Image (cartoon, rainbow, N blue to C red):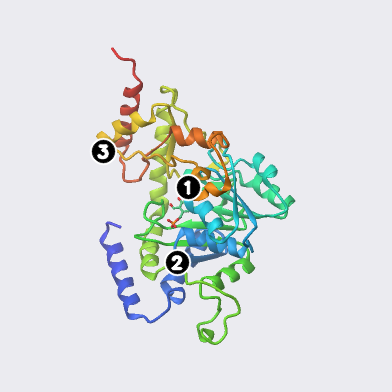
Amino acid sequence: MKDLFSQFKILLSFWNILKSKDFPWENQIVRDLEKKLSDYLEIPHVLGVASGTDALILALKACDVKPGDEVIVPAISFVSTAGAVAWIGAKPVFIDIESASFNIDPQKVESAVTPKTKAIIAVHLNGRMADMEAIRQLADSKALMVVEDAAHAFGSKYKGGSIGYYGDLACLSFNPTKVFGGCGDGGAIITKNAELARKISLFRTYGSPRYQEFGINHPIIGTASHLSPFQAAILDTKLRSVQRVTEKTRQNYFLYSELLKRVGDLVLPSNPSEYFINGYRFPILSKKRDELRLLLKKQGFDARIQYNVPLPYFEAFQYLGHKKGDFPNAEKLANEVLCLPTNYRLAEEEVKEVIRIIKKCFAPAN
Ligand SMILES: Cc1ncc(COP(=O)(O)O)c(C=O)c1O
């Protein structure tokens, strides 16, 4: 957003928002953004909400998940994936991740299904989509709903389908750390299903379809979860450059992929051709990850451990009774992962410097 035209456009939008008396969900800027996102992702319904966490909660509600129901979730993710399930009184049923993709293991989903299972949440960790075909097939055979936690995966694809193509609903976060992030909280729910979209539009506006009916008749109970028009104005401007940003992020990702092959004990992410990875993070596994992280930090590079504790071991999920050893792949990831920076602002030389630092760490001492 450095160019003058973008800054001017945002200021103009802010001025129009300040003048308007619209509610957020009726605001033209929000509606325009929803339409543009729907065109970009080629999924008919996009509904802006207050955050990625709210998107998950409302998506589960739209799937009719109720207290006492079970929802299958991967053992590694940001807390909101399982937190959303618990927040509405349902039970998160954790399963281990695949060792190659770090995503939910479709082979393990089947044995976790019980008569109480209502839905599966597939997280597209680090921008690589989960094996959505396998998950969809399994969900269909068991009459389950599929929610995609696509917070990391704006712009990613699997077998040509974007987020929201295989799942019943996909949830986006627009928080500032994301590939397509704004300047605060924000999120969206994406769906091909008009009925689910209708439900969510009620849920996010106090359970009533029209402002004229507010206070007179609310057919269901809803909440207030709106994408702020200010966020929408910023995101609208960013959408114009998101393809360029993604391309640069991917270049950084693939530079690591190419130049870190066979270095030390590093395990690199695999990149099967049916996946279009947006490059959000480049996760490596190494027994030396803490040392690597420190070395990179000293040189000003922000390599992060994401995530360093599997969700089932959080204090908040102790009531589920899991113990160390239950999720070996998630534990290995938590103990060894380091996400290298891929941000589009990093120049090729900087990425090469990160690579040099890592190689030096593994070089035999003279
Ligand atoms: C995988 C994942 N899901 C959900 C969320 C929640 O998004 P938000 O911060 O917009 O509530 C995040 C945020 O970082 C995330 O990484």
Q: Judge the density around disc 1: few (<14), some (14-19), many (≥20) Cα neighbours within 10 Å.
A: few
Label 1: element kind: helix
Q: CA distance from mark 1 to mark 3?
A: 33 Å
Residue 318's x, y, as percent? 52, 47
**Residue annotated with mark 1:** 315
- Rendered image quadrant of residue 248: top left
Q: CA distance from mark 1 to mark 2?
A: 38 Å
Count of numbered marks: 3
The quarter of the picture where the C terminus appears is top left
Q: Judge the density around disc 3: few (<14), some (14-19), many (≥20) Cα neighbours within 10 Å.
A: few
**Residue annotated with mark 3:** 300
The answer to whether mark 2 is within 8 Å of ligand 1 is no
Disc nearer the start of the sequence (1/2): 2
Residue 116's x, y, as percent? 69, 55
| Residue shown at 65% from the left, 47% from the top | 135
Confirm whether residue 277 shows in the render: no
Asked if labels 3 and 1 touch by Cβ distance under 8 angstroms, the answer is no
Residue 284's x, y, as percent? 44, 33
Determine whether, in the image, residue 184 is placed left or right of residue 34: left
Label 3: element kind: loop
Asked if labels 2 and 1 touch by Cβ distance under 8 angstroms, the answer is no
In this rendering, the answer to whether 296 lies above or below 22 is above
**Residue annotated with mark 2:** 33
Q: Judge the density around disc 2: few (<14), some (14-19), many (≥20) Cα neighbours within 10 Å.
A: many
